[in-house]
Image (tube, rainbow, N blue to C red):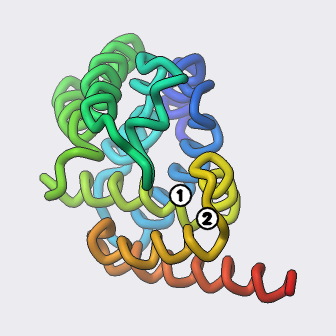
Amino acid sequence: MKTIFQKIWQLAEPYLNTRKNNIHTKISTEFAYRLLEKEGGDQDIVIPAIILHDVGWKRVPENLQLKAFGPKATSPELNRLHEVEGAKIAKDILERVNYDEDRIEEIFEIIDGHDSRKEAISLNDKLVKDADKLWRCSEEGFYIDIERFEVNFVEYLNIIRSKLQKWLFTNSAKEIAREEIKNRVKELDDTI
């Protein structure tokens, strides 16, 4: 990881200690690197955007967060709040590390609609959206979500399978998701 990305990560850390975002961001960043390799895109946009995309959850009270996302969400305005606040926090962090102004603007735009905006505004936005969603298919993300959403393995697997085509933009992300889902199914089979 580039030194500048490490600095961004360090400044983001205090905002990532809610909703298991420290784990989510680490895994999503790993997916972002894989997608950049396969799809192209601008690493200097995608990596800071994925590191910072969920810092705004720190501004949403923890007792309300589960109302904002997941299969039982009832308050989408709180999800939107995390995007708006996250974009502001991200801009502040990027300015503190003297990041390129033009890149700050694109990162700001990506973060400001990474969940609520259903269409991607650029390849970089597609990669951030895909890396964010792929977390749900990862081993750690899958089991964290089962626990937090209070659903069983098969229920959550069906939720993910039903939404992947709608969630993911790139063929590479769809391929990674299929691979990850196969791994989750194998884990279930191994326990039976």
Q: In the depicted view, which residue is nearer to us: 170 or 137?
A: 137
Name the residue at 42% across, 66% down. Answer: 35
Please provide percent x and percent y for residue 149.
Answer: 57, 50
Q: Element type at marker 1? A: helix
Number of residues whose C-alpha sits closer than 10 Å to that of mark 2, classed few (under 14), some (14–19) or many (20 or more): many
**74 or 102: nearer the viewer:** 74
Residue 105: quarter of image: top left
Q: Residue at x 43, y 55 (%)?
A: 71
**Mark 2 touches mark 1? (CB < 8 Å):** yes
Residue 59's spot in the image, x, y percent? 42, 16
Vertically, is 147 above or below 165?
above
Give the Cα distance between marks 2 and 1.
5 Å
The residue carrying pointer 1 sits among few (fewer than 14), some (14 to 19) or many (20 or more) residues within 10 Å by Cα, namely many
Q: Which residue is mark 1?
A: 135
Residue 138, label in figure: 2
Q: Is residue 183 left or right of residue 119?
A: right
Q: Amino acid at mark 1?
A: Trp
> Residue at horizontal 45%, vertical 57%?
32
Quarter holding the N terminus is top right
Residue 190 in the image: above or below residue 10: below
> Left or right of 52: which side holds 188?
right
> 129 or 107: which is nearer to us?
129
How many tags in the picture? 2
Relative image position of residue 109 (x, y in whole percent)? 18, 36
Picture disc at residue 149? none
What is the three-letter code of the residue carrying label 2?
Answer: Ser
Q: Quadrant of residue 161?
A: bottom left
